[in-house]
């Protein structure tokens, strides 16, 4: 696996340096920070209210890091590694045609990919920060209760 790090966002290079050997995805993934112009996901985001720290476009093999959400959540480097690994989990599902019963099941299977890389506790703390953050004042436009309870289920499961 390789990253095409479009705007040289540091965290993606740091992630690769540490986990490349452990990742069995045979593809190149475009990665960038949300303030980078030219990514597909950024354009889509402008027309939706959906927002989270990392977003994956499984059709185009892109992962975007949201600068505003990541700094608001104040993640550690390893927590961000866990979130990147989770997004790779989505790509793994797509690449290997792994069957998922529903969205929640897919989220859990993507979480398992981060667990496999040894990032279980970091993923758990990252999700907890997201939960705290969205309980505050965040994502008012989303269906908060669903979002929160889905996050809670994932945290409990880990
Ligand atoms: Zn996910």
Image (tube, rainbow, N blue to C red):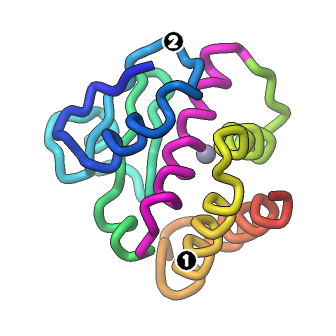
Q: Is residue 79 magenta?
A: yes
How many residues crowd around disc 2 within 10 Å: few (fewer than 14), some, or many (20 or more)?
A: few
**Res. 14 in view:** yes
Q: Is residue 1 above or below residue 86?
A: above
Task: State whether the magenta stretch is mostly helix, strand or loop.
Answer: helix
The location of residue 96, given as percent across then percent down, is 68, 14
At 20% from the left and 33% from the top, the residue drawn is: 6
Q: Nearer the viewer, residue 114 or 97?
A: 114
Which span of residues is magenta-colored?
A: 74-97
- In the rendered image, is residue 52 in sight? no
Left or right of residue 157: residue 65: left
Disc number placed over residue 134 in the picture, else none: 1
Residue behind mark 2: 26
In the image shown, does 127 or 58 lie closer to the viewer? 127
Residue 38 higher or lower than 79, as above or below = above
Q: Is residue 104 above or below residue 134?
A: above
């Amino acid at each position: 696996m390789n990253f095409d790090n479009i705007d040289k966002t540091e965290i993606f290079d740091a992630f690769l340096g540490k986990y490349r050997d452990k990742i069995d995805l045979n593809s190149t993934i475009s990665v960038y920070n949300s303030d980078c112009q030219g990514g597909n996901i950024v354009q889509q985001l402008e027309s939706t209210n959906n927002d989270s720290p990392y977003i994956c476009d499984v059709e185009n093999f892109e992962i975007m890091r949201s600068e505003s959400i990541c700094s608001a959540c104040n993640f550690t480097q390893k927590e961000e590694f866990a979130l990147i690994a989770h997004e790779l989990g989505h790509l793994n599902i797509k690449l290997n045609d792994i069957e998922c019963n529903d969205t929640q099941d897919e989220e859990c299977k993507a979480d398992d990919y981060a667990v496999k890389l040894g990032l279980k506790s970091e993923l758990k703390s990252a999700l907890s920060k997201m939960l705290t953050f969205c309980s505050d004042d965040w994502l008012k436009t989303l269906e908060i209760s669903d979002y929160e309870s889905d996050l809670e289920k994932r945290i409990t499961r880990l």
